[in-house]
Amino acid sequence: MLDRREDSWRIAKFRYVAKGMGGKTYRGTTEAISEAALIQQLREQELFLVESKNLTKVRGYKKLKAKQLAAFCRELSTLLSGRTDEIQSGNLSGSGCGDDREDRGCGRKHHDSPD
């Protein structure tokens, strides 16, 4: 039977911020088995860990390239510009007060209602 914790021994990559004895800040990336091992490595260099992030566990998000971001912005702009009339009228969902003369329960003042 396989042990489900077999990945626990793998070396992880950490991004860290540490301080030296003189107060100087050091930033970097290094590999360690755990955060405790990272702390030990930094102590051997006479550094004290301030902050660390396990980069091996971080997944799912990638930075977009400039061309990809531009294409996304154009598509989003096109999508939103098609909904401009609905946004201005307050009728985003297709329900509510699409026609002032027919829908009396929306709470808006209707043009042909007797006041």
Image (cartoon, rainbow, N blue to C red):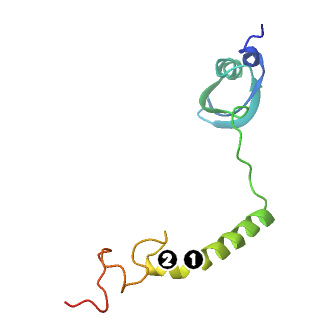
Residue at 61% across / 79% down in the picture? 81
Q: Quadrant of the C terminus?
A: bottom left
Q: In the displayed structure, would residue 37 be above or below residue 86?
A: above
- In the displayed orientation, state which residue is furthest to the left: 115
* Quadrant showing the N terminus: top right
- Along the line of sight, the residue nearer the viewer: 2 or 44: 2
Image quadrant assignment for residue 51: top right
Residue 104, given in percent of the width and then of the height, sits at: 31, 79
- Residue occupying image coordinates x 29% and y 84%: 109
Q: Are marks 2 and 1 in contact (CB under 8 Å)?
A: yes
Query: Amino acid type of disc 1?
Result: Arg
**Height in image: 79 above or below 115?**
above
Instruction: For mark 2, give the secondary structure.
Output: helix
Give the camera-side residue of 65 and 100: 100
Who is closer to the viewer here, 48 or 102?
102
- Amino acid carrying label 2: it is Ile
Residue 87 tag number: 2
Q: Which quadrant of the structure image shows residue 4?
A: top right
Percent coordinates x, y for residue 93 in the rendering: 49, 68
- Determine whether the residue tagged by mark 1 lies in a helix, strand or loop: loop
Classify 10 Å Cα crowding around label 1: few (below 14), some (14-19), many (20 and above).
Answer: few
The image position of residue 85, as x and y in percent, is 52, 82
Please indicate, yes or no, whether residue 21 appears anywhere in the rendered image.
no
Q: Look at the image and tell me whether residue 102 can be seen.
A: yes
Q: Which residue is mark 1?
A: 83
Residue occupying the point 49% across, 72% down: 94
